[in-house]
Amino acid sequence: MTRARDLADSADKDITGTLAVDGLTLPDSGKAIFGAGNDLQIYHDGSSSRIVDAGTGNLLIQADELIIRNAAGNETKADYTTNGAVNLYHDNAAKLATSTSGVDVTGALTTTAGATIAGGDLVLDEGSPEIIFQTGASHYNWMIAAQENVSNTLEISSGSQDGDYSNDTFTPRLVVNSSGHVGINATGPIYPLVVVGNAANHCSAFHVATNGYAAALFYDSSNTFRGQIQVGSGGTGYLTVSDYRLKTAVNYDWDATTRLKQLRPARFEWTADGDDAVPVDGFLAHEVQDIVPEAISGTKDAMKDEQYEVSAEEKDADGNVTKEAVMGTRSVPNYQGIDQSKIVPILTKALIESVAKIEALEVRIAALEAD
């Protein structure tokens, strides 16, 4: 062993064996260097303390229990346990911890535009990523899921699970598909907005609270206003645009009585009502189509293709998709519709014609009686 007095001169010393010291003091930028090629250096540069690994391989810190604390030793920054959790702390409180099932976050998980991951976006990938909200194991949850295997559909669902997601029972409540169609309680919306009620007395129900304002506005593909639903204290108005500035070739001289006599009002029952059906008054759409075509939508006996789920996707105990959902297409009736308000002008004109005839007959009768 080289004694301390031998190290006092300025010459470099090579030490073979063990160097035992009670303390080692190095000045600023004085380095403790390890490795034949200055691979590892530990020093203080006057501003910061540095551990510099410039060699090949990895810098390894080996410990069964590794804890990082502040200089005073009274605040934990992070701890690492063999076969256990890795915990990250804020103000001595654990905020992020690994677990056997993933990562547990205490408090809010927030990303900002300045984040380095995807520009501040929260990105979920692989299969059908899900965000699940719960108040505790086996309690009701909300889930946001990007259903990559079902036409790139985004779902917000409610339901419950058993704690490890192996027996998920989520029901889609809001769906946005790849076509931009939105479904409320509807899994496969084929129109821009589809609303399905979840109770017998709330079938496709909207609750709108307004004070004389429009509850819904309707525009055509050229963004021209075409009508609105307006709710006020006096009731609900279903208004279609009728401004004279949108009309041309206005004609008041036409025969309504002849067309009125072609209409065939009927009494019928709705098949969907089954044994509870009661007779109602109305028209059969295809019988009105040639007389008042603007009142009718669709074509008699038309069919359309409808997408449906043949079999649902299956997951394993870890929530991984083991079998993708299978979708199919089937042909279903494309029913005709009728806007009976479009018949009102014919009724009104026919009544005017009838009143004119009645008044003419009254004049003739009065003249005969006078004779």
Image (tube, helix red, strand yellow):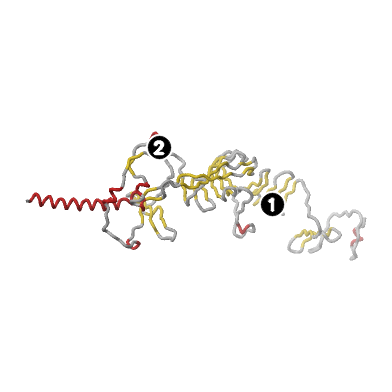
Hey, which quadrant is residue 35 in on the image? bottom right
Q: How many marks?
A: 2
Circle 1: is it few (<14), some (14-19), or many (20+) Cα within 10 Å? Answer: some
Q: Is residue 107 left or right of residue 28?
A: left
- Residue 273 is tagged as 2
Helix, strand or loop under label 1: strand
Circle 2: is it few (<14), some (14-19), or many (20+) Cα within 10 Å? Answer: few
- How far apart, in angstroms, are the residues tagged by discs 1 and 2? 68 Å
Hey, which quadrant is residue 29 in on the image? bottom right
284 or 241: which is nearer to us? Answer: 284
67 or 231: which is nearer to us? Answer: 231
Which quadrant would the N terminus be assigned to in this image?
bottom right
Mark 1 or mark 2: whose residue is earlier in sequence: 1
* Residue placed under numbered mark 1 in the picture: 77
Question: What residue sits 59% from the left and 43% below the top?
Answer: 313
Q: Residue furthest left?
A: 371
Q: Which x, y percent locates residue 232?
A: 35, 51
Which amino acid, mark 2?
A: Asp
114 or 333: which is nearer to us? Answer: 333
Hey, which quadrant is residue 321 in on the image? top right
Q: Is residue 40 left or right of residue 265?
A: right
Q: Residue furthest bottom?
A: 10
39 or 15: which is nearer to us? Answer: 39
Residue 40 against residue 267 in the figure, above or below: below
Q: Which x, y percent locates residue 368?
A: 10, 50
Q: Which x, y percent locates residue 160?
A: 56, 40
Helix, strand or loop under label 2: helix
Question: What residue sits 52% from the left and 48% below the top?
Answer: 175
Which amino acid, mark 1?
A: Lys
Q: Which x, y percent locates residue 179?
A: 52, 53
